Image: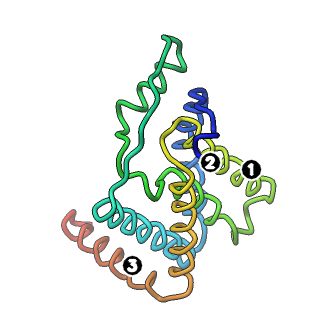
């Protein structure tokens, strides 16, 4: 199935543009209640830990196509390939972070429904961009979404987020004391 998806280097604009999407949505998510923020952050951090475990224990790689031409799009895809090695692909952090942008807004009443829908559409575009630029395969995309949903579920169904909140507050107090505030 992955071979049937054509290589489309133009999707590299979305692949890189997702960093802005993440920044905007993560900022919106931080504006929720402290409890909701810590639940979100706990799920997000737990997901990164799971990715690290996969990257160490089950490293994956991908074969990339040869880039032909000297246009802007070809230069951009070469740049992506140069800065982002084709290793540690499962689960896709691009897809996971993009899906977290949607998850974090689900219960947020202050965010309009049109924006939540737009975030889902942008996340789906990021999924497609990871496939169209040959950065990931379908299993990586599914893994990213699955890990995001799993860690969100765990964070919201346990009190682990309270542990993270207490740790965060202790660190903040310690830093404040060192800075004399």
Mark 2 or mark 1, earlier in chain: 2
Are the residues at dot 2 and dot 1 in contact (C-beta closer than 8 Å)? no
At 59% across and 74% down in the image, what residue appears? 33
Count of marks placed on residues? 3
Quadrant of the snapshot with the C terminus? bottom left
- Location of residue 92 in the rendering, given as x and y in whole percent from the top left corner: 48, 54
Which residue bears the numbered disc 1?
118
Identify the element where label 3 is drawn: helix
Direction from residue 37 to residue 49 in the image, left or right: left
Q: Closer to the observer: label 2 or label 3? A: 2
Residue situated in front as seen by the camera: 113 or 103: 103
- Location of residue 32 in the rendering, given as x and y in whole percent from the top left corner: 60, 68
Q: Closer to the observer: label 2 or label 1? A: 2
- Location of residue 55 in the rendering, given as x and y in whole percent from the top left corner: 33, 59
Which residue bears the numbered disc 3?
164
Residue situated in front as seen by the camera: 174 or 10: 10
Direction from residue 110 to residue 91 in the image, left or right: left
At 37% across and 38% down in the image, what residue appears? 84
Name the residue furthest left.
178
């Amino acid at each position: 199935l992955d071979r049937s998806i054509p290589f489309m280097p133009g999707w590299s604009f979305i692949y890189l543009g997702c960093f802005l999407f993440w920044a905007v949505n993560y900022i919106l998510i931080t504006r929720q209640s402290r409890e909701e923020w810590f639940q979100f952050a706990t799920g997000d951090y737990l997901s990164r830990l799971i990715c690290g475990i996969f990257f160490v224990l089950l490293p994956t790689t991908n074969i990339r196509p040869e880039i032909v031409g000297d246009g802007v799009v070809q230069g951009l895809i070469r740049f992506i390939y140069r800065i982002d090695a084709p290793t540690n692909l499962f689960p896709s952090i691009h897809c996971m972070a993009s899906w977290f942008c949607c998850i974090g807004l689900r219960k947020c009443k202050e965010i309009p429904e049109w924006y939540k829908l737009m975030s889902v559409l942008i996340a789906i575009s990021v999924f497609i961009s990871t496939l169209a630029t040959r950065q990931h395969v379908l299993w990586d995309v599914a893994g990213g979404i699955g890990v995001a949903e799993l860690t969100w579920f765990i964070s919201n169904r346990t009190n682990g987020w309270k542990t993270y909140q207490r740790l965060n507050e202790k660190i903040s107090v310690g830093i404040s004391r060192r800075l004399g505030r």
